[in-house]
Amino acid sequence: MTKKMWKQHDLKKHYDIVIIGGGAHGLATAYYLSKMGVRDVAVLEAKYIGYGGSGRNTAILRSNYRTEEGIRFYDQSIQLYENLSQELDFNLMFSQQGHFTLGHTEASVSGLTTRAENNKALGVDSYMLDPIEIKKMLPEIDISDHPRYPVLAALYHPPGGIIRHDAVVWGYARGAEQGGVEIHNLTTVGEIRTEKNKIKGVQTNRGFVSCNKLISVVAGWSSDVCAMAGIELPFVTHPLQALVTESYKPWLHHVVVSSNLHIYLSQTDRGELVCGGGIDGYPHYGMRSTLAFLETYAAHVLELFPVLHNVKVQRQWAGLCDMTPDYSPIISPIDEIEGFYVNGGWGTYGFKASPASGYNSAQMLAQGKVPANIAPFSYNRFRENRLVGEKAAASVSN
Ligand code: PYC
């Protein structure tokens, strides 16, 4: 009989730690907690694991950020990803094929050059390429002056690449389960209870569960969950759309992002092109695809790769992103409620953060101390005017 990677459990009345959200961040948090010997942990997922952003992203990994805080954090994530298949004994198909961010204006080339220098200063492999060098590595790209925005230069980041996002979710889930964590699908949290500014537990569709510590790790739904605890954080939720084409023989061997054209694409091992753009321009919670996105994406990608004019689109989808004003996440204990923690605000760049997010969140929960790599991401930065302005390093400068 096939062995299940995680089981169905009865929901206990009490856990030491409850994690709301069964995406890659929540499951990674559970996995690293179990590795630290913390076993009385439940992951509560309203739908099924990987239903949210973890199953809807375009699986791009990179650490070529702009700020020192961002570079250190995402570099830690890439380093954890590099050993993760082995550690979880699960093939995550991490292909470190290199990552281009194209610049089409003087301003964007200047921003990319700053990132290359900041990356180098912190030991992250990134450098600038001119159009001839770009063309050697991406033979199908149009570097002529015909496009509306000709390619002027690129930031090239060799350690960047793509991974099988579902496998990351399943690998962490299996690892967490093996470590004694309970994963509860179809378990909706409708209320967060506190007493004297201390966390008491959560009311779910399967009954009340008390806990000593509660963390919200729900990406686009962060505002809703925080509101249940009476906490308002500066999240705004926007959908991010993506699409996948039919399979073609391998021709694109690197991830390509254009910050000015607001597009990115990569080719999977199966030959499909996985494509995405910027967030929808106004906040909402809809997860529907639009023709406007498809038309804009097609118009922009054809400027760069005219060879794609006959490509057939197979599917479109959308996911929810909780954006913060400085485009950096919030991973933090909440001072107003003892035992309540928030991990959110991942915008369009959360999936690549899963290992570092989980690793540091686990330490924060288990040791009651905020690790140095996530200390800059406290929500107090918005009161104290210590923003971590990562705006120019969002994949397509959302
Ligand atoms: O930040 O690398 C990124 C990214 C890729 C797709 C969406 N965001």
Image (cartoon, rainbow, N blue to C red):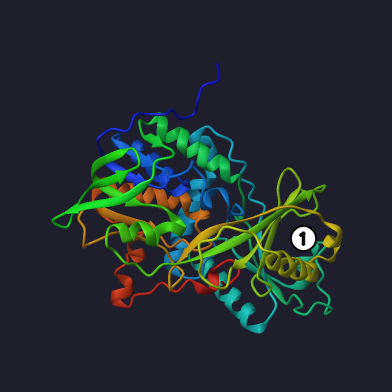
67, 307: nearer the viewer = 307
Task: Please say whether residue 255 is visible from this viewpoint.
Answer: no
Q: Amino acid at mark 1?
A: Met
The answer to whether residue 243 is left or right of residue 393 is right
Q: Position of residue 197 (x, y in %)?
A: 17, 57
Q: Would residue 74 be seen by someone viewing this image from the given angle?
A: yes
Dividing the picture into quadrants, the one containing residue 326 is bottom left
In the image, 15 versus 291, the foreground residue is 291
Return the residue found at the far left.
196
Q: Does any atom of ligand 1 lie closer than 8 Å to the CB of label 1?
A: no
- Expressed as whole percent of the image width and height from the top left, the position of residue 12 reads 28, 32
Q: Is residue 21 rendered to the left or right of residue 271?
A: left
Q: Is residue 245 left or right of residue 22?
A: right
Q: Is residue 284 above or below residue 75?
A: below
For residue 10, what is the image quadrant? top left
Q: Residue at x 26, y 60 (%)?
A: 334
- Looking at the picture, how far across and down is residue 31, in whole percent? 40, 39
At x 50%, y 68%, the residue is: 121
* Residue at 74% over, 43% down: 270
Residue 193, above or below 93 = below
Q: Which residue is under mark 1? A: 137
Give whichever of 21, 67 is nearer the camera.
21
Whether residue 281 sits left or right of residue 67 in the image: it is right
**Residue farthest to the top, as pictured:** 1
Q: Quadrant of the N terminus?
A: top right
Percent position (x, y) of residue 146?
Answer: 84, 78
How many neighbours does mark 1 have within 10 angstroms: few (below 14), some (14-19), or many (20 or more)? Answer: few
* Number of residue marks: 1
